[in-house]
Image (cartoon, rainbow, N blue to C red):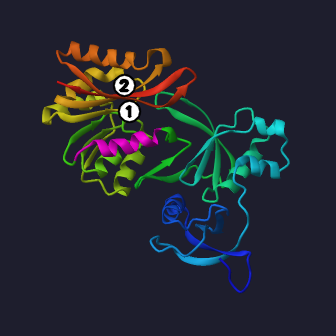
Amino acid sequence: MRENGSDDRRLAVVVAKPRTQQVIDALDAEGVYDADRSVRSWDDDAVAVPVTAPPESVEVREIVQQVGEPRLRTLEDHLRQRGWTDEELAAAPGSWAVVGSIVLVDVGDSPRPEEVGQALLALHGEADTVLARGGISGAHREPDVRVLAGEGDTETVHTEHGTQYGLDLAEVMLSPGNKAERARMGEAVEAGERVLDMFAGIGYFTLPMARAGADVTAVERNPTAFRYLVENVMRNGVDGRVQPYRADCRDVVPGFAEEARADRVMMGYYDAYEYLDSALDALKPGGVVHMHEATPEALVFDRPIERLEAAAADAGRSVAVLDTRRVKGYSEGVAHVVVDARVE
């Protein structure tokens, strides 16, 4: 698009930083997102997203003229611009995740990690902090992260399929690889279902299910995760459909089951099989259980199904497997899997 005879000025729309990815997706769907130019900072809380024409269906703050700079499309492009050699680029990260306003990356053996951080900030104009992620440790699965670049704020709000997750990535985890599974649970439930989420975290599965109309009892024992769970319930406007408990799920099940047993039990924890007796106590005949597990490749899907069938047999119940899914890799030779089953 040209103005005043110049071919180096282009349009951009100004939007709040937290809306960046949502707006890009909407602009792309409308066919006006300009992928050949970079998203650029506009002010402290907004970015300018390049477009080829004014959008008709996307709400924006304003439409502005912006000097058109060709996009450096990849991390490799940005690192080459910084003088990285082919040998150094071979050790650069091959993947990362954008969570709200934060980029999470495993730098591995990459040289000059701080330059990787700066390059990722340049690549993702909506982000203001880059964190290097290490391992997960402790009973509450607390992440190990360090600031590589940017403002250093580890607290953010991440949006997926309309669900908002507030969290502090230095204290609680959100796995980008579970995105499809979180969305799927919002599609699996029906309005009015009674659901027990035994390991709710910050609301990973609770929030999509509640937004779909389910009544969810959400149990989380980590005090930090529980605080974000309560905040996220309010943030998403589902406080009328979520009953949160900061407790061990085993302690909640007796009272829950006495009131009414669940149509569905969510077990989003890698060692969920250890809690199958409580899950089955909470689940009504004909109800559905979703059991997650970290399973060695050689035992996918046999081990989780065998564990579920054994627990059901101990309770005098029967199991019909409805579905099995690989969610993502957990570690080398180990897969994160889910088994959906109806228990009579």
Q: Residue at x 20, y 43 (%)?
A: 193
- Measured as percent of width and height from the top left, residue 252 is found at 25, 32
Q: Which residue is mark 2?
A: 272
Amino acid type of the residue tagged 2 in the rendering:
Ala
Which image quarter is the C terminus in? top left
Element marked by disc 2: helix
Q: Residue at x 60, y 59 (%)?
A: 126
- Measured as percent of width and height from the top left, residue 131 is found at 64, 45
Q: Is residue 191 above or below residue 311?
A: below
| Label annotation for residue 292 | none
Dominant secondary structure of the residues highlighted in magenta in the image: helix
Q: Which residue is mark 1?
A: 268
Disc 1, disc 2: CB below 8 Å?
yes
Q: Which residues are magenta?
A: 178-190
Q: Is residue 22 above or below residue 249?
A: below
Element marked by disc 1: loop
Q: Nearer the viewer, residue 252 or 15?
A: 15
Furthest-bottom residue in this view: 4
Left or right of 165? Residue 316 is left
Asked if residue 141 shows in the view, the reply is: yes
